[in-house]
Amino acid sequence: MTWRRLAGPFALLACCATVAACGTTDDSSSGDKATGGEATPAATEAKKSNTGEQSEFFVQADYDKQLAQRSVTPEGDASKPWTQMIEPEMVSTEKFKSKKSSGWNVCFSNAASDNPWRQNGLITMKAEAENTKEIAKFTVVDAEAKDDKQISDIEAMTSGGKCDIIIIAPNTTATLTPAVEKACESKIPVIVFDRGVTTDCPVTFIHPIGGYAFGADAAEFLKEKVKPEGKILALRILPGVDVLETRWSGAKGIFDEAGLNVVGVEFTDGDPAKTKSIVSDYIQREGSLDGVWMDAGATAVAAIEAFEDAGQDVPPITGEDQNDFLTKWKDEGLTAVAPTYSNFQWRTAVIAAVKVLKGEEVPKEWVLPQPKITEETLDQYVKPNMPPLYYALCGCEDLPGFPEKWGGK
Amino acid sequence: MSTENATTPGFGDETGDRGRRLLSSLMGTGTIFVLLLILWVWITILNPSFAEPGPFLAYLKRSAPLVILAAGAYFVLVSGNFDLSVGSLVTVIVVVAARLIDGDPSNTWPVIVLLLVIGVVVGLVNGFISTVLRVPSFITTLGMLLILNGAVFLWTGGAPRGALADNFRSIGRQGINGIPWIEQLPWSVLLLFAIGAASALLMRSDFGRQLIATGDNERAARLSGVRVNRVRILAFVLSGTLAAVAGILLAGFGGVSAQVGQGLEFDAITACVLGGVVLGGGRGSVVAAMAGALTLEALFTWLNLQGISGALEDTVQGVIIIAAVSFASYRLRGAR
Amino acid sequence: MTVVDPPEQSAGSRASRRSERVAGWRVGILASPAAPVYGALIGIFVIAWIVVTIHGGTFLTVPNVVNMLQRSVALGIVSAGQTVVILLGSLDLSVAQLISLASLLAATTMDGQDANVVPAIAAVLALGVGVGLANGVIITKLRVNAFIATLGTALFISGIIQNRWDGPAGAVPKSFEDLGYTRFGVIPLSFFLLAVIVVVVWFILRNTRFGYRIYAVGGSEDVSKLSGLRTHRTIIAAHVVCSLTAVITGLFLASRLGAGTPTVGTDGGYDLESIAAVVLGGTALAGGRGGVLGTLGGVFILAVLDNTFNQLELNAFLKDVVRGVILIAAIAVYALR
């Protein structure tokens, strides 16, 4: 009986105690996360650069290499950037040469198609496969952003006996590594692109220069345009994905060195509504912001709108080659830059698959160029006839079906 | 006469005097209003600009979708059912709006009508399956959640396509300009008050009484002549329609997004529960449910100002809803 | 199965009750709720086989069947636990977050060392007991509805996970990873894990007094209380069982992924999916009727659907629509009986 009488007040007390405890612990702890820390509350003094600890993915050598690769001229035809290679080390694929000269079955395990960048890329990939006469069947299995499902999908592909070559776009770096290793053991050639894995057993790993370069491009722009001690908000999609972690690491190095005040590092899940709320919250908390760094462009417009809704000018902001961001940049005359993550790599994956099955050489690591869009080059990339969620670096304009397949007019 | 929480001993019954009844109802659902006020005051202490018309209206504007969803959830909950499909219905609304409007302002109004119709139809289907086919509403709306999520992305190929026109988005983002002192009265805030008033009035009508009776004791209600199935189906239709309205507001506010509806059904139910609605039906007031939603949003604002953004927010939310329901339960049982 | 008699304690009556029950079962099995599920499973299997073969795929091959079994393991283990609480008339929405937390705890404790595997398993099981106890106590002593109580626990755990971890963490040693990938002949080792758990749960439900009480409380809590059953203990114990199965699922997933991740539980939708599997399997949401064998059938049905859709290369979203329709249709059919 006493239980019941005490239960209610006890519950309320517990609730208040937890809330109070949360308030105090969060103020003092910096968390032991490997990546950027929580934003410090407005009450404490603004720290010089509270970007937190460096990411556990950070590799200084790779960082330096990528930043240098930005200025290297890629080999290959500059009008077809999806075929270009930067500092390639070629490997032979003789042992993978297919017994038949056509009628190939290419299988693709896709991490997900849950964002416009991936959707765009998938359309390009399918179009390229259709346009290649040697490919008889192009099978796509979508893992719906679930690691465990992708592991099962890859297992089904390797044991099914129907795939001549397997292309994998892994969902998460660490957790898909065992599955990719097992796929390599199966004698079917494996190509990995986009997010990587921590094994070099695949025949080739295709990716643009990389995240460090992306993040650095954006951060250098802000360093140039924002006054020292200026308040910068960093928005990241999600943690644990190597291509995104490296972007943040790349930027962090530059922010730390420049003495810019990063007031917050937040995860947006790639969701525009959430991004807008987060930016509004920070505007409310800080009064105003002097710059916004984003690790991708899908939600850049939402961030811009948060400023508009709050009645403030949009500060220097970084985005990506998504058409709605480019259009808004041009129309509103914003101060912005758009580093890119070459959407045309989806096309390269199919091209590489064909090369492998033909027994031609491919680079062990196929590094694609990664141009950045600036005020000067903006006009080349803005496409008024394409939908807002189209990516300028699609690399698809010469494929049959353009522009309708990609939603354009 | 609206039915509030169980009358506590010592306070008047139906024929008691008005003052006593008011006091009794305040004691019942009053807790949430007190909590709301405390939070508002606390937030103002942390951030004095909160009390200014601009920021306060921004807070109301942000809360409007959840408040409207809570009203919809209330109707279903108080009649003894669950509606787990509202979150995915909101996503459907946002995605369908983007695809059909496709940036062309002349499409806006026809599309809005269509969106409301979608809300009504989904509600009808949910209601029909849960009553006539006698499938527990938990399962019906869970199945509907899967169907809606699947269907809308099937249609768009995996991620939202198209674009919303500016005039569509102005519903969620803009308002009536030129009003003295507050400058702009957002449409969403107007809608919030209109729906709040309409819902409160609805609950005072025959329909409202029947709804509560159905949730309280279905057999007794049926024996008293209440058309239980019809009442329940109507509750689902209200839930679906209000979810559509919330979706329109969210689409306007945040733009096109695939995750906008995720978890909203749980937020709506939490808001109702905070406001004193009992799962299982028969108790609670719609105004208190809406106040619960405002409280939840105020709580998030408060957490944000404390610097507990993102992570521990969930933990605190979990503790609070358990505490709130336990408290309400204690009051209910304690009375017996 | 509805319970009529209150339990009696004398040895003689216990024995006679036992033989009565065994006799009753032989008739009961055919009439049990599990029967139609397996009928449906066979039906769906046949249809899938025909459709896939027409499409040019291979359905009834060993690798494919093994793949389907493999896909059933994670959901199967947690659904077994969920069966127990639903039979009580309760439910557990916290399993998805608990699975993620368990995978993280396991992987970070193991930290790639073989020696740490046993302590990791112990730690994770302790976590399961703790969370189960919390759920049970909140429901019984704090008098909070199971929906809200377990939703609250889920949020609580979610916040802890997000606060402490950003992404995959910890490392599972190769030896433990084998749990996720080894096969005995063609049957995956993990499938044996599932089988053991299902048998254990089945045994508990059908052969022990505890199981007896679960059906009783599920049938009617008030009547059970009046008959002298300690309902609170039963409810708490059932939630502990459910949480234990959830953490075991977390352990298994950690072995598959090689690390723990904050999203593995929610990715798989194990909270709502396990409830769906249980309900598809014939257990009534209100409690008192059903069993874990039916749940297993429900899990298999979902795995066959998954596999078929992959084979047909049909859109994953179409699969969601079909699953939703099947769920509703199945329960509508059950409601007719």
Image (spheres, rainbow, N blue to C red):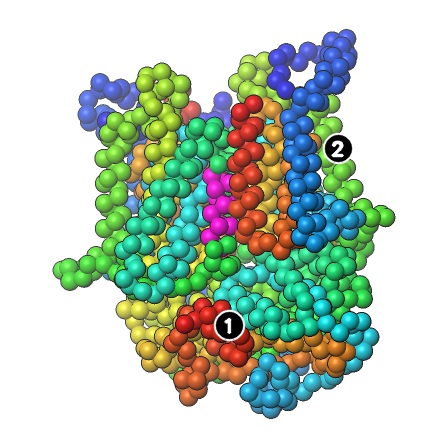
Three-letter amino acid code of the residue under disc 2: Val
B278 or C202, which is in the foreground? Answer: C202
C149 or A297, which is in the foreground? Answer: A297
Q: Residue C181 placed where, x, y %? A: 77, 53
Three-letter amino acid code of the residue under disc 1: Gly
The residue that label 1 is drawn on is A401
Q: Chain of mark 2?
A: C
User: Does residue C45 appear in this view?
Assistant: yes
Q: Are marks 1 and 2 in contact (CB under 8 Å)?
A: no
Per the image, label 1 sits on a secondary structure element best described as: loop
| Cα–Cα gap, marks 1 and 2 | 56 Å
Q: Is residue B281 magenta?
A: no
Quadrant into which the C terminus of chain A falls: bottom left
**Quarter residue A310 falls in:** bottom left
Magenta extent: B141-153
Give the label, 1 or 2, closer to the camera: 1
Q: How busy is the neighbourhood of tag 1: few (under 14 within 10 Å), some, or many (20 plus)? A: few
Q: Residue C154 placed where, x, y %? A: 54, 44
**Quarter residue A302 falls in:** bottom left
The residue that label 2 is drawn on is C199
Q: How busy is the neighbourhood of tag 2: few (under 14 within 10 Å), some, or many (20 plus)? A: some
Q: Is residue B147 magenta?
A: yes
